[in-house]
Image (spheres, grey):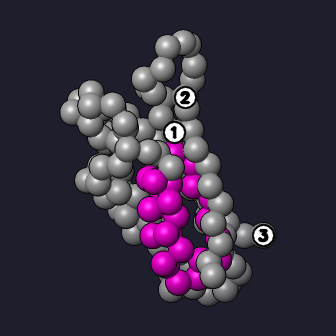
Amino acid sequence: MDKIIMKKLQFYGYHGVLEEEKKLGQKFSVDVEIGSSLKKAGDTDNLQYTVNYALVYSDIKHIMENEKYDLIETCAEKIAAKILSFPNVSWCLVRVNKPEAPIPGIFDKVAVEIIREKQ
């Protein structure tokens, strides 16, 4: 199965349930995998037969930096819906990582991961 992988895309956003998160913001990172048949793009060296990951990045950046949600689950759903709107995409995996989640304890990150298919 062919896929395009984008890892550790980093953003500063204002997502969270707590007022401090909404006011001060925090760092987030996003990983995506995009399922797409890449054979024709590879054979022809033509961008129209693949997924333009520069445009995908721009859309993710907009969602993470300009929109505000209480839940990172919502961020993931919005990103997945946008990715699935691209032609040549059959499925996507989206992981939204929140390394500074406001919970007591020592941890690397809190994350959500979703997989969605084009209907």
Query: Which residues lie in the magenta part?
Result: 74-96
User: Which residue position is annotated with label 2?
Assistant: 109
Q: Is residue 11 visible?
A: no
User: Which residue position is annotated with label 1?
Assistant: 97
Dots 1, 2 in contact, CB < 8 A: yes
Sequence order check, earlier mark of 1 and 2? 1
Q: Residues within 10 Å of mark 2 (few under 14, many from 20)?
A: few
Q: Nearer the viewer, mark 3 or mark 2?
A: 2
Q: Nearer the viewer, mark 1 or mark 3?
A: 1
Circle 2 SS class: loop
Residue 101, position as x, y percentages in the image = 45, 27
Per the model, the C-alpha gap separating discs 1 and 3 is: 25 Å
3 is higher (above) or lower (below) than 114: below
Circle 1 SS class: strand
Residue 111, position as x, y percentages in the image = 56, 38
Per the model, the C-alpha gap separating discs 1 and 2 is: 6 Å
Q: Tell me the quarter of the picture where residue 102 sits.
A: top left
Quadrant placement of the C terminus = bottom right
Mark 3: which amino acid?
Met
Mark 2: which amino acid?
Lys
Q: Is residue 27 visible?
A: yes
Mark 1: which amino acid?
Asn
Residue 33, position as x, y percentages in the image = 62, 59
